Amino acid sequence: MAEAIYVGRLLVATPLLDDPNFRRSVVLVLEHDEDGGTLGVVINRPSEVAVTQVLPSWDPLVTGPPVLFEGGPVQTDSALALAAVLSGEEPLGWRRLQGRSTMSRLGTVDLDAPPEILAGEISQMRIFAGYAGWTGGQLQAELEEGAWYVVDSEPGDTFNSDPGALWRNVLRRQQGDLALVATFPEDPQQN
């Protein structure tokens, strides 16, 4: 039986997924509709591009590392920002993710809004170039092929200070045999 997909859950690439866009990626689900498809961002791929190079006015609000993250292969020339708010209120320029209660302080940022209106309202923020998207039924087919694990997220995942270790760390905290996958070598032929 496949795990339920909903906003706030993580899609963790299995070792079988060798697509370079998603190899060892961790995707936070931002939108999901069984018929309409799924949208998310890869949260463990910092790029080499500094936020100051692309969106300098937002740089002071970004949680380290202060770079754009590679959110996925779709519309890589556009930016999407996620931020956690300090209170349960919904400040101007921020829209709450419509998911489980654990996601109540996480939302998207309107990057066309002046950063000053959110400066005192958010505690953490990341900006992603592009996103990951699946049409209706496409993600389900990939799940059936064994390309993804669907697991719960934890509050620190989205703004993890060591995004390069997130794939292993997310798997390591799972129950049973799934935790063993964290030890899977980068290149199984070198084993």
Image (tube, rainbow, N blue to C red):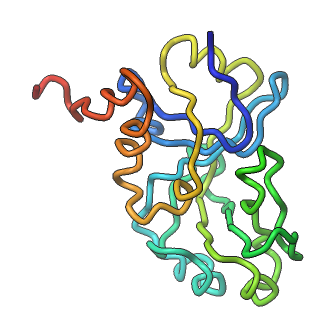
Residue at x 41%, y 57% (from the top left corner) = 163
Quarter of the picture holding the C terminus: top left
Which picture quadrant has residue 138? Answer: top right
Looking at this view, name the residue that lies furthest to the front.
Answer: 175
Quarter of the picture holding the N terminus: top right
Residue at x 43%, y 30% (from the top left corner) = 19
In front here: 131 or 76?
131
Left or right, residue 62 beside residue 83: left
The x and y percentages for residue 88 are 82, 68
Residue at x 19%, y 25% (from the top left corner) = 188
The x and y percentages for residue 107 are 75, 60
The image shows residue 19, relative to residue 61, as above or below, that is above
The x and y percentages for residue 14 are 42, 26
The image shows residue 92, relative to residue 165, as above or below, that is below
The image shows residue 110, relative to residue 14, as above or below, that is below
Which picture quadrant has residue 113? Answer: bottom right
In front here: 79 or 174?
174
The x and y percentages for residue 108 are 75, 61
Residue at x 44%, y 60% (from the top left corner) = 46
Number of callouts in the render?
Answer: 0
Left or right, residue 141 beside residue 108: left
Left or right, residue 187 beside residue 152: left
